[in-house]
Image (cartoon, rainbow, N blue to C red):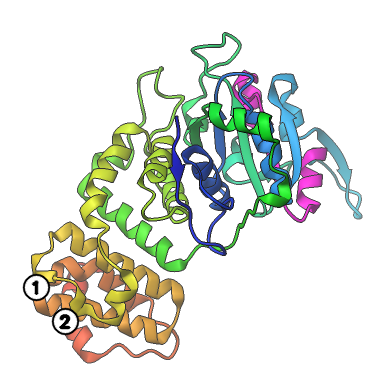
Amino acid sequence: MSGPAAVLPAGRCAHWVGMISTQEATFRAAIAANVPVFIKGLSGIGKSAFIRDYARASGRHLESVVLAHKEKSDVGGIPTVRESAEGSVTTEFAVPGWGERLITADKGLLLLSEFNMGEIDVQQACMNVLQERQVGENAYLPETVAIVLDGNPPERYATSIDLPSQIANRMVHLDWELDRQAWLDGMAAGWPTSTDRIVDDGDPRTDRLAREKSLVLAFLDAHRHFIHDQPTDPAREGGPWPSPRSWDNAIRVLSRIDEDATDVQTTALRGLVGQAAAEAFMRWRIEAADFDLRAVLDDPTVEAWDRHHPSKTLTVLGAVATYAVEQGSKDVWQAALDVLMHCAETTGRKDVCLRSARLLLSRAPKGATIPSSAEDMFGPMLRSIGAWA
């Protein structure tokens, strides 16, 4: 049974007031990161009710498309003949009605219900919707539209099937469990109304996004077999597996989860890159994530650079450089460069600093001047590998 989970403070991440279950916290992090979520669980445990309740609580217009009852054209659009003002005739796929309504809504939620009961060609028609958010010929769902799927476990229901691997790799897989105590409490005392619940889909902190990106990239640099490991076993290919796409989604979702909520982080990763990659990353993360990005930028001496494992140094410097570039501030960029210079001087390991130095020196903000000391420190090595003019 999922236990309580901490969530990011108000104004930073999607959350309900109070403590929420691990599965709900994972769901909200994925929605806030705009990564599709596949909720899979037994019939009758309240999956659809939870999704409807979330839509009401977050002020989203809900469109439910039941794939078990749909044809390919219901998702991809019906071919429509159009005549231009010049008289030329073309055939385009019209945007389905549910797509039009979601595009015009202030905020929306697309529920692809009974997803793994749909025919394979109907599921495949959803691929562009899931990752590129494309509906019809040339229309796209805005970023304010969340995408959720629900279904039943194939091993328990003959009418449900395993997802094709290329579809499975586009989402967070979330095994949904019935919270029996919450159901008993709700039935006895009444269910909370939507006004009791607060959902915040604000932007994530850029320092968290930079931190998570740096952690993932440093881990994958040291464990390259996890960058792409598509299952060959038919029993596994319909679930989560590691790929560049799923790791990119993982970075976005992790940036929306409280750094202390390791149960939520693990659940999200298992649902994105699979159990083996998720558990390996979480074990590695324990040491590598032990740093304060803002503190390092304020004072590079807070880190014991000469005692770091190279992977830890790569992680910290990567986070510093990524954050500085995304901020676009001259002062932050200079502070990040000071961190790299201090690390290189302290450790004598300019090679470990090169990836971050290349990023910083090639993306200097407007008005910034590259100090001659930085050019002398990193320029020769970067030029020798063709990484800097």
Residue 293 vs 47, above or below: the answer is below
Which residue lies under the disc numbered 1? 347
Q: Amino acid at mark 1?
A: Thr
Residue 174 left/right relative to 301: right
Residue 238 lies in the magenta-colored region: no
In depth, the one of 362 and 243 nearer the eye is 243
Tell me, yes or no, if residue 58 can be seen here: no
Sequence-wise first label, 1 or 2: 1
In depth, the one of 313 and 163 nearer the eye is 313
Q: Residue at x 34, y 74 (%)?
A: 294
Q: Amino acid at mark 2?
A: Met
Which part of the image, by quadrant, shows the N terminus? top left
SS category of the residue bearing label 1: helix
Q: Residue at x 32, y 66 (%)?
A: 319
Residue 90 location (% of width, % of height): 82, 42
Residue 174 location (% of width, % of height): 50, 33
Magenta region: 97-126
In the picture, the disc for residue 103 is none
Residue 384 left/right relative to 101: left
Residue 185 vs 13, above or below: the answer is above
Residue 63 left/right relative to 265: right
Q: Residue at x 80, y 53 (%)?
A: 104
Which part of the image, by quadrant, shows the C terminus? bottom left
Residue 358 vs 80, above or below: the answer is below
Which residue lies under the disc numbered 2? 377
Residue 124 location (% of width, % of height): 60, 29
Q: Residue at x 38, y 75 (%)?
A: 324
Residue 251 location (% of width, % of height): 41, 52
